[in-house]
Image: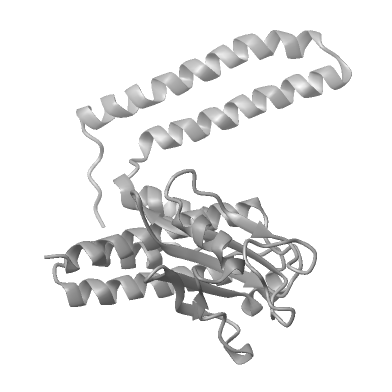
């Protein structure tokens, strides 16, 4: 395949992009060079390491200058690969949901987003990687003041999770109030349901020991909450909280669009 050599404009752009990198490296050499020359022992080693770090950082910045970001899809893809490990599928589903123009297709697209969110949470969160298949993710939505199970993924052989959190049950009211909050949203993470007190009562025969939950909110509207549990004690950490927060926003976006399409 024939490739044309760069023209004058491309050469000028390349020179302009490389000039800051050259200046930074030159300044680093002027500063670190004499220090390396006059130092001895560990001091010399550390000054050399410092020069190497500056050179590596400079190379990275140069690469970023020359590579276009590609807008929101590229940035979101990077976040998903780094934080959630899901990559394109969730983003593609959300994009498809946002492009639907009728109620039925929007509802189905929101379900597709929900399933991918549940699978992503289940397979990409948890400190015990060998037992991630034993985790279970679920989403609860509002139904006349109660929270009802809309969908779940994982641990099917052990039965479904609780089907309803009732506002009329005193032991569920704290959970209901927490899920309703649309400002200062907090993540509820419990390391061991046997020793810590969750926001709502947990059966003594529950098949899980730890969980992390977060409300699903878009704007000032609560759509329910997303939860992930595991039979492993202390299986979730702050990074999992961040992943769940990211996934809850994606889920909320799909649900908000489906609701908006259905309104006359």
Q: Is residue 255 left or right of residue 147?
A: left
Q: Nearer the viewer, residue 152 or 127?
A: 152
The correct choice, above or below, for 84 with respect to 114 in the image is above
The correct choice, above or below, for 260 with respect to 184 in the image is below
The residue furthest left is 264
The residue furthest right is 41
Q: How many marks?
A: 0
Residue at the location (52% across, 56% down)?
178
Q: Quadrant of residue 92?
A: bottom left
Q: Nearer the viewer, residue 186 or 168?
A: 168
Residue 97 image position (x, y, % from top left): 26, 66
Residue at the location (74% across, 79% down)?
204
Residue 183 image position (x, y, % from top left): 44, 45
The residue furthest bottom is 157
Quarter holding the C terminus? Answer: bottom left
Q: Quadrant of residue 237?
A: bottom right
Residue at the location (40% across, 25% down)?
18
Residue 174 image position (x, y, % from top left): 57, 59
Q: Is residue 123 left or right of residue 104?
A: right
Residue 185 image position (x, y, % from top left): 49, 48
Quarter holding the N terminus? Answer: bottom left
Query: What colouring style does the render use?
Result: one colour
Residue at the location (45% across, 56% down)?
180
């Amino acid at each position: 395949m024939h490739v044309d050599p760069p023209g004058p404009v491309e050469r000028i752009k390349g020179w302009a992009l490389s000039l800051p990198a050259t200046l930074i490296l030159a300044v680093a050499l002027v500063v670190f060079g004499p220090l390396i020359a006059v130092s001895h022992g560990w001091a010399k080693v550390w000054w050399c390491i410092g020069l190497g770090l500056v050179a590596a950082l400079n190379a990275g910045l140069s690469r970023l200058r020359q590579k276009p970001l590609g807008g929101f899809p590229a940035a979101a893809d990077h976040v998903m690969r780094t934080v959630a490990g899901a990559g394109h599928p969730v983003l593609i589903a959300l994009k498809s949901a946002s492009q639907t123009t009728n109620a039925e297709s929007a509802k189905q697209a929101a379900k597709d987003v929900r399933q991918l969110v549940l699978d992503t949470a289940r397979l990409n969160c948890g400190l015990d990687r060998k037992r991630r298949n034993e985790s279970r993710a679920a989403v609860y939505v509002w139904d006349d003041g109660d929270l009802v199970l809309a969908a779940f993924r994982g641990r099917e052989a052990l039965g479904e999770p609780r089907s309803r959190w009732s506002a009329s049950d005193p032991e569920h009211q704290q959970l209901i109030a927490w899920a309703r909050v649309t400002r200062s949203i907090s993540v509820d993470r419990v390391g061991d349901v046997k020793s810590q007190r969750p926001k709502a009562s947990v059966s003594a025969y529950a098949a899980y020991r730890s969980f992390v939950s977060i409300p699903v909110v878009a704007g000032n509207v609560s759509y329910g909450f997303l939860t992930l549990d595991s039979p492993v004690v202390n299986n979730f950490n702050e990074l999992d909280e961040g992943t769940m927060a990211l996934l809850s926003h994606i889920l909320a976006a799909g649900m908000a669009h489906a609701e908006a399409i259905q309104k006359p």
